[in-house]
Image (cartoon, grey):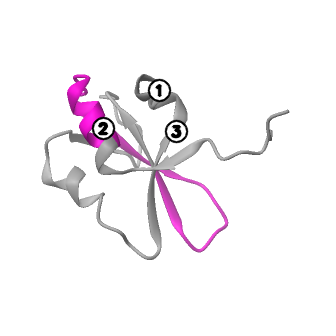
């Protein structure tokens, strides 16, 4: 039986970025996740071109996206497993 509370997120990394580029992703939306933790979490959503309030969209080749790969103490950039299915 699988653990129903398993974390559906993976920390953004160079392999995910390269896979998205290879699969033709053009844009990435950055969405802040609501938590009560002292760490800020942001979800990266590939090929989402329409921002809602407080969301930002970046072209996949921008320096802003590669900067998300750098570790920060109180900020984590995450990708939901549904956006990683092509890797498996």
**Reading the chain from its start, which is encountered first: label 1 or label 2?**
2
Badge 1, how many Cα within 10 Å: few under 14, some, many 20+?
few
- Could you tell me if the residues under marks 1 and 2 are in contact, i.e. CB atoms within 8 Å? no
Q: Please tell me in which quadrant of the rendered image residue 18 appears.
A: top left
- Residue at image coords 45%, 30%: 83
Q: Which residue is mark 1?
A: 88
Corner quadrant of residue 20: top left
Please report whichever mark, 1 or 3, sits nearer to the chain's N-terminal start. 3
Q: Is residue 81 above or below residue 33?
A: above
Residue 29 percent location from the top left of the image = 34, 39
Residue 78 in the magenta stretch? The answer is no
Label 3 near label 1: C-beta < 8 Å?
no
Residue ID at (50%, 47%): 10
- Label 2 sits on a secondary structure element that is strand
State which tag comes first along the sequence, 2 or 3.
2
Residue extent of the magenta highlight: 16-42
Distance between mark 1 and mark 2 Cα atoms: 21 Å
Residue carrying label 3:
80
What secondary structure is found at the residue carrying circle 3?
strand
Q: Work out whether 1 lies above or below 77.
A: above
Front in this rendered view, residue 46 or 30: 46
Labels 2 & 3 near each other (Cβ < 8 A): no
Q: Residue at x 44, y 67 (%)?
A: 75
> In the rendering, which numbered label is found on residue 28?
2
Report x, y in % for residue 27.
25, 33
């Amino acid at each position: 039986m699988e653990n129903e509370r398993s974390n559906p997120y993976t920390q953004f990394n160079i392999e995910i970025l390269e896979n998205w580029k290879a699969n033709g992703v053009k844009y990435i939306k950055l969405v802040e996740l609501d938590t009560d933790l002292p760490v800020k979490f942001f979800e990266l959503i590939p090929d989402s071109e329409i921002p809602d309030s407080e969301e930002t969209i970046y072209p996949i080749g921008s320096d802003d996206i590669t900067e998300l790969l750098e570790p920060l103490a109180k900020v984590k950039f995450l990708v939901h497993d549904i956006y990683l299915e092509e890797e498996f």
